[in-house]
């Protein structure tokens, strides 16, 4: 199984997962044109994407979903709540995610799981093949026992490190936004992400990428330090997804 990012952060998110014949796109928070450009950069043709799985209706995850699906006839998957809450318009093939029920795309099994976040019916995903598990966790305000359960034993983890507590407190966000981001239904800070790493069974974990890093309220160095310390890895072994370029293909091993 391989994965890549077209970009990650509050200005747009899109992640790719591929295995054998299937390529899945998780969210499309970039405009159609921007998404196509970014796909080209990592060698993927938009028409090769077999499905777009949407985590929730916030613009940084859904901006290009409708236009992408209409142009490329890509099947979309999202929860009932996400579908009701957004305006992606008419799309040719919209399917419902029922949280907890597995989806199969040939040899990839996708398990959607729920997260506390201020959206209508948000979820995140666990991808499994016969050999490996890849977990994606962003846009969650806290770590729940259910999240820990879902991510136990993953081989690779894409993990939100949205903000540093002090940088958020001292930063330029207005009070209501600071409160929202830091709340139990907002975004994970570096320490919460580190806490998750310490809680899950990480015996098979070989790859960690820090995701959804705030450009204003965090520094990738702080995120990497927090994660490396929590799991006793070298700083250099923690990867980072950037807003502008995401990251190129990596393998789950
Ligand atoms: Zn987001
Ligand atoms: Zn969100």
Image (tube, rainbow, N blue to C red):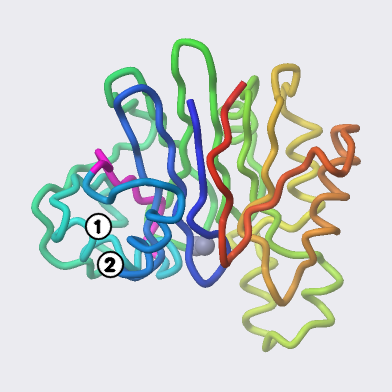
Secondary structure beneath dot 1 equals helix
Q: CA distance from mark 2 to mark 1?
A: 6 Å
The quadrant where residue 83 appears:
bottom left
54 in the magenta segment: yes
Query: In x, y percent, where is residue 91?
Result: 12, 58
Query: In x, y percent, where is residue 220?
Result: 77, 60
33 in the magenta segment: no
Q: Residue 83: which disc?
A: 1
Instruction: Name the residue rendered at 77%, 68% in the picture.
Output: 218
In the picture, measured across the screen, residue 209 lies left or right of residue 222, that is left
Secondary structure beneath dot 2 equals loop
Query: In x, y percent, where is residue 119?
Result: 43, 61
The quadrant where residue 198 appears:
top right
- Given the current orientation, which residue lies at the most extreme top position? 130
Q: Which residue is mark 2?
A: 86
In the picture, measured across the screen, residue 63 lies left or right of residue 13, that is left
Instruction: Name the residue rendered at 74%, 88% in the picture.
Output: 172
Q: Which secondary structure is most common in the magenta stretch?
A: loop
Instruction: Name the residue rendered at 74%, 64% in the picture.
Output: 163
The quadrant where residue 251 appears:
top right
| Quadrant of the image containing the C terminus | top right
Determine contact: label 2, label 1, CB under 8 Å. yes
Residues rendered magenta in the picture: 48-57
**Relative to 185, does residue 50 appear above or below in the rendering?**
above
Judge by depth and name the residue closer to the eye, 2 or 216: 2
Q: Does any atom of ligand 2 lie closer than 8 Å to the CB of label 2?
A: no
Judge by depth and name the residue closer to the eye, 60 or 36: 36
Label 1, residues with CA under 10 Å away: few <14, some 14-19, many ≥20: many
**Relative to 145, does residue 58 appear above or below in the rendering?**
below
Judge by depth and name the residue closer to the eye, 169 or 235: 235
Instruction: Name the residue rendered at 64%, 31% in the picture.
Output: 148
In the picture, measured across the screen, residue 29 lies left or right of residue 88, that is right
């Amino acid at each position: 199984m391989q994965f890549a990012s077209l970009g990650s952060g509050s200005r747009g998110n899109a992640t790719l997962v591929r295995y054998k014949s299937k390529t899945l796109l998780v969210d499309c928070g970039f405009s159609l044109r921007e998404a196509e450009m970014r796909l080209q950069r990592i060698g993927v043709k938009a028409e090769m994407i077999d499905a777009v799985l949407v985590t929730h209706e916030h613009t940084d995850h859904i901006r290009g979903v409708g236009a992408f699906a209409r142009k490329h006839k890509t099947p979309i998957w999202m929860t009932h709540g996400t579908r009701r809450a957004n305006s992606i318009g008419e799309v040719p093939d919209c399917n419902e995610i029922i949280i907890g029920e597995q989806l199969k795309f040939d040899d990839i099994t996708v398990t959607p799981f729920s997260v506390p976040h201020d959206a209508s019916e948000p979820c995140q995903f666990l991808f499994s093949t016969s050999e490996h598990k890849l977990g994606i966790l962003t846009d969650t305000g806290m770590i729940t026992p259910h999240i820990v359960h879902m991510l136990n034993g993953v081989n690779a983890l894409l993990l939100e490190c949205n903000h540093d507590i002090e940088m958020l407190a001292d930063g330029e966000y207005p009070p209501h936004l600071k409160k929202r981001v830091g709340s139990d239904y907002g975004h994970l800070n570096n320490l919460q992400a580190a806490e998750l790493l310490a809680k899950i069974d990480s015996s098979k974990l070989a790859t960690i990428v820090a995701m959804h890093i705030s450009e204003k309220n965090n520094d990738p160095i702080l995120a990497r330090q927090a994660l490396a310390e929590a799991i006793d890895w070298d700083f250099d072994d923690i990867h980072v997804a950037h807003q502008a370029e995401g990251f190129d293909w990596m393998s789950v091993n």
